[in-house]
Image (cartoon, coloured by chain):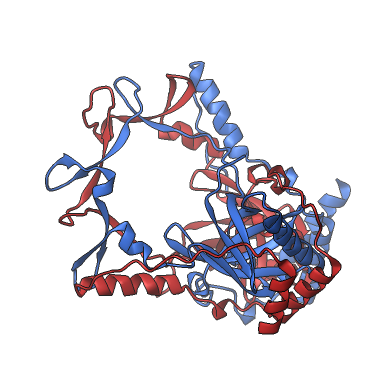
Chain colours: A blue, B red
């Protein structure tokens, strides 16, 4: 089984469930290493003190924070850890919400939450939470500290497990007000919206994530294969950008006609 | 200060071209530290060392390599790696539409705002209005930073959002993680009590109700350290699993 990233307790009222957190993503990407050009040996990153020009062991490295007055405050990991005494070990469920009310902009990273250990009490409490969340179709909101950041987390039932999605804080979502959007005079005519909606309807289908594959990684694998066989890698040219059409209605009608004929 | 766009291009919606600018919709507010030498705060540098020679290697003498098999490397230039993007495309073809509420939270990666360009604002307004009315989200592909991503376009208020999405193949199937069996399933009574606890805590999600208290706590520790105070680690509490689930539920409900 994969290694857990965090373990602690999921607390729901006075019910505590010892849990372990696992990553919800797999790394399927191709990774490159930095090599010394001369002999193709992967280089290692070592930490050096810039003043002494000497290598510094990891336990002699601390966290430096520059204040607004340009003073440097040095905190050891232990001192920094005091900022999160209890919460590093507990996810306190503060509320239950409807998933439909959550703007996807807030979703950050997915994890799977599993019971820690095989104790009957732990498994039963986990099972109880799972069943209740499945039945009520609600998601729990809690907060916890992972490494050196506090997260708001959404926990819900999926595939007979509890899954956790970390969320951004509200001040980490920028306001949209400064983004240039069309004004009143650009308002489309009803006929145009009807045409565009007809086009959307004609091109609608259910969300099926399995139809999307990482074509970039696929091409990258081919490039690595080709290069290893000594082939030349061609850099493709930039595609031409379509330019705005003068007559939106005509473009919509033409597109719809193409779909129907085709 | 007006935001700076990070990409310019065109959304192709059938034969309708929507010229757009892309802006980041999110920013991190995590307090960042830099690595320093604990004893005197001097700067720490990361140096690339050749483990064979123990000597530092200059950045200009570094190449990128992929390990085909143990010790056998294939070297690639940045241009060759960039070629995998399949042409520096400046267009996003939105060629099908899905009900946005069918997309599970796991798939959402990052969010961007789409801004209208001066030309083709009518096309932007049309796409926005049509998505809004149909209740659907547009799906396309976006080449950005040498990566190609599946993206979902969604109208919110006056603006179009662009979400980059994770691939299904990159998500862990939760049922691959083994779950131990219980000897005794939760009883109807326990489920009923837990459900009333859930109902009692039910609320409408409002992001501004929650703020990062840890960030404040870190700033507090920094201030105390700066004023020369001692930083004492607090005692760690460790909650135990409730042996008597029913009693814990009853007590929780009594507290609620």
Q: Quadrant of residue A78?
A: bottom left
Front in this rendered view, residue B230 or B28: B230
Q: Quadrant of the N terminus of chain A?
A: top right
Q: Position of residue A54 (x, y in %)?
A: 16, 40
Q: How many marks?
A: 0
Front in this rendered view, residue B40 or B93: B40
Q: What residue is at 30 percent from the left and 68 percent from the top? A: B232
Image vertical order of residue B120 relative to residue B250, above or below? above
Image vertical order of residue B11 relative to residue A216, above or below? below
Image vertical order of residue B67 relative to residue B82, above or below? above
Q: Position of residue B240 (x, y in %)?
A: 58, 63
Q: Residue furthest right?
A: A261
Front in this rendered view, residue B46 or A145: A145
Q: What residue is at 28 percent from the left and 56 percent from the top? A: B34
Q: Is residue A252 among the parts visible in the rendering? A: yes
- Is residue B244 found left or right of A109 in the rendered image? right
Q: Quadrant of the C terminus of chain A?
A: top right
Q: Quadrant of residue A98?
A: bottom right
Q: What residue is at 81 percent from the left and 58 percent from the top? A: B185
Q: Position of residue B26 (x, y in %)?
A: 50, 65
- Is residue B229 found left or right of B69 in the rendered image? left
Q: Is residue B122 among the parts visible in the rendering? A: no
Q: Residue furthest top?
A: A229
Image vertical order of residue B210 relative to residue A220, above or below? below
Front in this rendered view, residue A242 or A203: A203
- Is residue A166 found left or right of A101 in the rendered image? left
Q: Quadrant of residue B15?
A: bottom right
- Is residue B153 found left or right of A6 in the rendered image? right
Q: Residue furthest left?
A: A52
């Amino acid at each position: 089984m994969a290694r857990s990233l965090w373990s602690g307790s999921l607390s729901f009222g006075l019910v505590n469930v010892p849990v372990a957190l696992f990553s919800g993503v797999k790394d399927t990407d191709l990774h490159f290493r930095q090599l010394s050009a001369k002999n193709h040996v992967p280089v290692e990153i070592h930490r050096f003190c810039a003043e002494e020009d000497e290598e510094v062991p990891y336990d002699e490295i601390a966290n430096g924070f520059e204040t607004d007055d340009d003073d440097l405050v040095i905190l050891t990991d232990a001192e920094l850890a005091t900022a999160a005494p209890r919460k590093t070990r507990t996810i306190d469920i503060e509320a239950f919400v409807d998933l439909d009310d959550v703007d996807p902009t807030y979703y950050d990273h997915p994890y799977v939450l599993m019971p820690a250990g095989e104790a009957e009490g732990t498994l039963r409490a986990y099972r109880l939470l799972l069943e209740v969340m499945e039945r009520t179709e609600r998601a729990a909101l809690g907060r916890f500290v992972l490494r050196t950041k506090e997260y708001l987390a959404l926990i819900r039932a999926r595939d007979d497990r509890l899954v956790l999605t970390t969320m951004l804080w509200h001040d980490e979502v920028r306001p949209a007000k400064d983004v240039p959007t069309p004004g009143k005079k650009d308002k489309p005519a009803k006929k145009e919206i009807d045409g565009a909606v007809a086009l959307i309807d004609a091109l609608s289908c259910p969300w099926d994530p399995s139809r999307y594959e990482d074509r970039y990684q696929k091409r990258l694998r081919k490039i690595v294969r080709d290069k290893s066989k000594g082939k030349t890698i061609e850099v493709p040219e930039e595609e031409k950008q379509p330019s705005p059409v003068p007559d939106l209605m005509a473009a919509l009608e033409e597109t719809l006609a193409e779909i129907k004929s085709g | 200060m007006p935001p700076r766009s990070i990409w310019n291009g065109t959304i192709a919606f059938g034969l309708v071209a929507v010229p757009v600018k892309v802006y980041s919709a999110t920013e991190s507010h995590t307090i960042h530290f830099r690595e320093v030498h604990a004893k005197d705060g001097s700067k720490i540098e990361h140096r690339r060392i050749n483990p064979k020679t123990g000597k530092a290697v200059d950045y200009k003498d570094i190449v990128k390599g992929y390990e085909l098999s143990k010790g056998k490397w294939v070297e690639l230039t940045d241009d060759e790696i960039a070629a995998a993007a399949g042409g520096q495309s400046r267009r996003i073809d939105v060629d099908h539409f899905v009900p946005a509420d069918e997309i599970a939270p796991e798939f959402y990666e990052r969010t961007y705002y789409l801004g209208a360009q001066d030309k083709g604002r009518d096309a932007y307004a049309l796409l926005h209005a049509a998505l809004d009315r149909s209740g659907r989200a547009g799906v396309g592909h976006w080449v950005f930073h040498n990566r190609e991503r599946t993206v979902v376009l969604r109208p919110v208020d006056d603006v179009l959002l662009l979400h980059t999405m994770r691939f299904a193949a990159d998500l862990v199937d939760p049922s691959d993680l083994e779950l131990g069996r219980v000897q005794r399933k939760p009883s109807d009574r326990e489920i009923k009590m837990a459900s009333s606890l859930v109902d009692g805590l039910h609320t409408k999600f409002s992001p501004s109700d929650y703020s990062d208290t840890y960030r404040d706590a870190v700033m507090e520790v920094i201030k105390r350290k700066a004023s020369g105070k001692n930083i004492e680690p607090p005692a760690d509490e460790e909650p135990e699993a409730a042996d008597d689930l029913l009693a814990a539920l009853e007590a929780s409900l009594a507290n609620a």
